[in-house]
């Protein structure tokens, strides 16, 4: 990938963030935004930008980066361009873990751990089913298995919610559709920690992903223990997805679309691929969140509904190509 | 002689007043509606009662509370999971949900009559209960006027007409007194906090909006018709309410939240806790709810 493209990606992310900070029920001019960020000028604008829009935009960025990296790693390891945490049931499993943890009163910092346990179980189940059709599974069997595991997760959440009040159910459905509306600097710091660890691990293991792409026999010939490499890549990708679910609920299709966009702008090997996916994912989710909170004022749309609107046509086009 | 004439004239005036008031009482549509045993419920079904029911299932917290208030509580044989007022409602068997209730559980209570909340979700339930031979009455209680109407109907149904009237009158007298006490005071603009995630408030069609107005306030989301709209915190900042009305469990978390500090009323600690024993249900406590809210918005205006 050429240097100029990296510069363009970073510039786009910066532009998207500035737009995200400036737009909302009180739109701000660039000058007013600058004053607000420094805590000067109109105090209402300053508090809106500093306590609401800034954490929200940072969280959207991290959610996008986490899902982008997770999607790139899953697609690489499975050699399947339809692989994605949401479609593989990883996110659904994470949601069950999170709902159980909230019910049990677990602290926010440990919520990703509970989500991770749920997502690890879901991904293990999906891979076990897909394994019946070969080492990495038929892409279609894998997606089918993932969708069904996701449906099971939905059913499990509905059962957990059966005895709850109408507002609790409405809140849970809202959360399952994904939102960064409740972002605080605390959420941002927790998610940043998980993404730094998971992302760094996958950047280190990117060479194994490159070798795995050559096929299992070639990889084994080059000295990579295929099963072990696959397992730890899955664990890292699931952890990233689980951490985003714990922070922002289910935001689908980002992990699917982003690696394709990264490939389109020229990322080939997995190391640049993972970094580019993080940047593209961040841009995509920041933009999706701007759409979610500005289209229908004074209310807002669930973030996951916006990303699904963007991602589903893309997925259908890919599916048709494969079939 | 003069004295007799005077007194007989006074008598005639008195008789005329009595006749006039009696006549107007009969013509008043509200009273006429409640005077007949037959009426249409809120699904449009014709309801007639020959004898007052002995076993009642009430699947709406508001109607359960009203039935207790008009002296029919001992006849309740089923209620929803959410009916917690009055305290004695706890001793009525819990049948489950208010919307799409379990019909077998309802039938198992062997009711003479089932009182449903008239929401679209319950249309099928009403049809099936009627086809099972159970008298079913669907009442929508989402406003103060609907509370009055439903209470008078319930009074007729259970044969406690006079008590139903006195409950309605006492609520109305309290509401009128609060309205009079806050009339002429500057309106306090209010954000009413219903739920946190997503952020839910009250719109124009909520009975809580009516109460806020009676209590001398102005709901900052009165421009939205929906009863429970989802809104964004940023928009609350923009609308800049004078005060927040919140439930007892929410106040501390709002005051401690970094996000909520963006709302000037929160920074100024103008976050008031309403009494959930009286505020939140369109029922017999509507008058007390108005007193509670008015006391928060205009301390001193209410004693």
Image (cartoon, coloured by chain):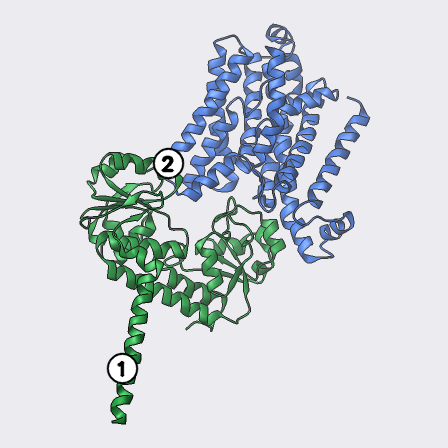
SS at circle 2: loop
What crowding class fits label 2: few (fewer than 14 Cα within 10 Å), some (14-19), or many (20 or more)? Answer: few
Instruction: State the blue chain.
Output: A
Q: Quadrant of the N terminus of chain B?
A: bottom left
Residue occupied by mark 1: B11
Point out residue B284 in the picture as x, y percentages from the top left corner.
33, 58
Residue occupied by mark 2: A162
For image coordinates 34% across by 35% down, the residue present is B124
The one nearer the camera, A62 or B238, is B238
Give the quarter of the image for residue A57: top right
Position of B182 relative to A52 (above/below): below
For image coordinates 58% across by 15% down, the residue present is A78
**Which callout, 2 or 1, points to the residue nearer the camera?**
1
Q: Which subunit holds the residue at mark 2?
A: A
Point out residue B44 in the picture as x, y percentages from the top left corner.
35, 43
SS at circle 1: helix
For image coordinates 75% across by 53% down, the residue present is A35
A150 vs B278, left or right, is right
Position of A296 relative to A230 (above/below): below
The one nearer the camera, B225 or A308, is B225
Give the quarter of the image for residue A191: top right
Point out residue A123 in the picture as x, y percentages from the top left corner.
50, 21
Figure colour of chain B: green
The residues bearing labels 2 and 1 have C-alpha atoms spaced at a distance of 68 Å
Q: Is residue B88 visible?
A: no
Q: Which subunit holds the residue at mark 1?
A: B
A49 vs B144, left or right, is right
Labels 2 & 1 near each other (Cβ < 8 A): no
The one nearer the camera, A1 or A321, is A321
């Amino acid at each position: 990938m050429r240097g100029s493209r990296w510069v363009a990606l970073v510039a786009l992310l910066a532009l998207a963030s500035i737009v995200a900070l400036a737009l909302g029920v009180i739109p701000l001019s660039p000058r007013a935004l600058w004053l607000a960020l420094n805590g000067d000028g109109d105090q209402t604008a300053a508090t809106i930008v500093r306590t609401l829009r800034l954490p929200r935009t940072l969280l959207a960025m991290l959610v996008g980066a986490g899902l982008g990296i997770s999607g790139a790693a899953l697609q690489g390891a499975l050699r399947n361009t339809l692989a994605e945490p949401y479609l593989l049931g990883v996110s659904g499993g994470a949601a069950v873990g999170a709902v159980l943890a909230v019910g049990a009163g677990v602290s926010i910092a440990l919520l990703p751990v509970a989500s991770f346990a749920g997502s690890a179980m879901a991904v293990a189940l999906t891979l076990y089913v897909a394994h019946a059709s070969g080492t990495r599974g038929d892409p279609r069997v894998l997606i089918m298995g993932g969708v069904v595991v996701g449906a099971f997760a939905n059913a499990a959440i509905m059962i957990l919610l059966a005895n709850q009040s109408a507002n609790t159910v409405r809140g849970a459905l809202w959360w399952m559709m994904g939102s960064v509306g409740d972002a605080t600097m605390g959420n941002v710091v927790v998610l940043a920690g998980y993404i730094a660890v998971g992302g760094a691990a996958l950047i280190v293991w990117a060479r194994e992903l490159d070798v795995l792409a050559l096929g299992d026999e070639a990889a084994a010939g080059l000295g990579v223990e295929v099963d072990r490499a696959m397992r730890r890549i899955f664990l890292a990708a699931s952890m990233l997805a689980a951490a985003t679910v714990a922070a922002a609920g289910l935001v689908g299709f980002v992990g699917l679309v982003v690696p394709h966009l990264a490939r389109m702008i020229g990322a080939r090997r997995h190391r640049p691929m993972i970094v580019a996916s993080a940047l593209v994912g961040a841009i995509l989710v920041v933009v999706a969140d701007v759409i979610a909170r500005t289209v229908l004022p004074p209310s807002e749309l669930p973030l996951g509904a916006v990303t699904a609107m963007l991602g589903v046509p893309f997925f259908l086009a890919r599916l048709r190509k494969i079939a | 002689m003069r004295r007799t004439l005077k007194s007989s004239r006074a008598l005639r005036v008195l008789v005329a007043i009595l006749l006039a008031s009696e006549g107007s009482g009969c013509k008043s549509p509200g009273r006429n509606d409640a005077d007949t045993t037959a009426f249409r419920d809120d699904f449009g079904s014709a309801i007639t009662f020959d004898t007052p029911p002995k076993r009642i299932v009430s699947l709406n917290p508001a109607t359960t509370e009203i039935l207790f208030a008009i002296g029919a509580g001992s006849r309740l044989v089923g209620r929803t999971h959410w009916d917690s007022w009055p305290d004695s409602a706890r001793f009525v068997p819990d049948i489950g949900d208010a919307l799409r209730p379990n019909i077998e559980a309802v039938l198992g209570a062997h009711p003479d009559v089932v009182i449903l909340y008239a929401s679209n979700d319950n249309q099928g339930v009403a049809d099936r209960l009627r086809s099972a031979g159970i008298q079913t009455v669907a009442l929508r209680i989402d406003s103060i006027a609907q509370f009055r109407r439903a209470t008078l109907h319930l009074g007729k149904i259970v044969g406690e007409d006079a008590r139903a009237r006195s409950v309605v009158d006492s609520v109305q007298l309290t509401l009128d007194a609060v309205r009079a006490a806050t009339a002429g005071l500057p309106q306090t603009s209010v954000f009413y906090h219903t739920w946190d995630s997503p952020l839910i408030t009250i719109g124009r069609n909520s009975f809580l909006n009516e109460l806020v107005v009676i209590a001398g306030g102005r709901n900052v989301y009165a421009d939205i018709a929906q009863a429970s709209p989802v809104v964004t915190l940023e928009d609350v900042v923009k609308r800049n309410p004078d005060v927040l009305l919140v439930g007892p469990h929410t106040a501390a978390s709002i005051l401690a939240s970094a996000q909520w500090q963006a709302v000037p009323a929160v920074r100024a600690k103008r976050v008031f806790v309403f009494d959930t024993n009286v505020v939140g249900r369109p029922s017999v406590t509507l008058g007390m709810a108005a007193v509670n809210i008015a006391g928060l918005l205009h301390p001193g205006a209410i004693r």
